[in-house]
Amino acid sequence: MFPLFIRMKGKKVVIAGGGQIAYRRLLPLLDEGACITVISPKAIDAIVHLAEQKRITWHARSIEPSDYADAFFIIAATNDPNVNEQIATYASPKQLVNVASNHLIGNVHVPAFFSRGKLQIAITTGGASPAFAKQIKKQLEQQFDESIAQHVEELYKQRKQRKEP
Ligand SMILES: C[C@@]1(CC(=O)O)c2cc3[nH]c(cc4nc(cc5[nH]c(cc(n2)[C@H]1CCC(=O)O)[C@@](C)(CC(=O)O)[C@@H]5CCC(=O)O)C(CC(=O)O)=C4CCC(=O)O)c(CCC(=O)O)c3CC(=O)O
Ligand SMILES: NC(=O)C1=CN([C@@H]2O[C@H](COP(=O)(O)OP(=O)(O)OC[C@H]3O[C@@H](n4cnc5c(N)ncnc54)[C@H](O)[C@@H]3O)[C@@H](O)[C@H]2O)C=CC1
């Protein structure tokens, strides 16, 4: 797996499933300005609420291949592993696909991550133990507390000044 940080503003993201896992994926993508559609017969209240506020689109039905044909990023997070695997099969090799129920398929893993201003730290175990990735994240969150954001901002200012003629 190759780590990347991707600018998601305006990118079309389709999420299959409307449970807690879908919501966990959705929130940081929404913060980044991605254009999110959730396809799921049922959705948790938090997702319904976002749809009511028109911050995301929610279609209350099962996912179909035409739903994600033009998506930049597809997240298969239904509670039916067969449906999730089918999504990975039908997706084009040009699309990013995350499969929440099987670390062996799809081409994207979502890491445990946190931000301190411009500093972002992401951890993956490649599916070996997501719980361990979470534990490492919690340790690093303590090591790099909120004050580091200011430090990074200072470094950024200095760097911009050096670049200016
Ligand atoms: C491959 C990956 C694919 C993907 O990208 O989705 C994947 C796959 C699977 N996770 C499963 C279970 C759990 N996942 C978590 C937690 C997290 N899982 C996350 C990522 C990933 N999970 C990707 C690999 C990343 C890596 O390897 O490091 C995190 C880091 C990020 C996030 O989800 O936001 C997030 C921590 C968030 C945080 O920072 O807090 C917990 C614990 C908890 O929820 O507290 C459990 C229960 C305990 C356990 O099983 O360990 C199962 C079995 C499902 C089933 O039983 O059906 C599969 C399927 C499989 O392994 O095949
Ligand atoms: N990667 C991770 O971090 C973790 C992944 N998982 C996996 O993620 C899956 C989802 O977890 P939760 O959100 O907790 O499940 P959930 O059961 O709360 O939600 C599943 C959602 O999928 C929807 N759904 C079912 N069939 C569908 C279809 N054909 N098309 C569209 N939507 C459909 C349901 O309406 C429901 O909204 C789990 O089954 C598990 O395999 C579970 C824990 C952690």
Image: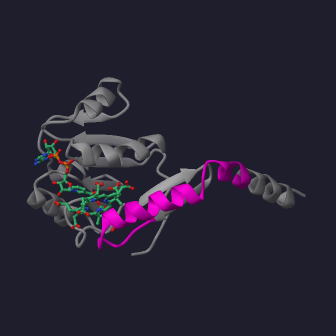
Instruction: Find residue 50 and report its image quarter.
Output: top left
In the displayed structure, 55 sits above or below 123; it is: above
Q: Is residue 5 visible?
A: no
> Which part of the image, by quadrant, shows the C terminus?
bottom right
> Where is residue 79 shown, x and y percent of the image?
13, 52
Question: What secondary structure do most residues of the magenta stretch adopt?
Answer: helix
The residue drawn where x is 10% and y is 54% is 80
> Where is residue 132 shown, x and y percent of the image?
35, 67
| Ligand 1 image position (quadrant) | bottom left
For this rendering, which residue is in front, 127 or 64?
A: 127
Please give the range of residues in magenta.
Answer: 123-152
The residue drawn where x is 38% and y is 60% is 134
Residue 122 falls inside the magenta stretch: no
For this rendering, which residue is in front, 63 or 144?
A: 144
Instruction: Find residue 133 and report its image quarter.
Output: bottom left
> Is residue 43 shown left or right of residue 129?
left
Q: Is residue 160 visible?
A: yes
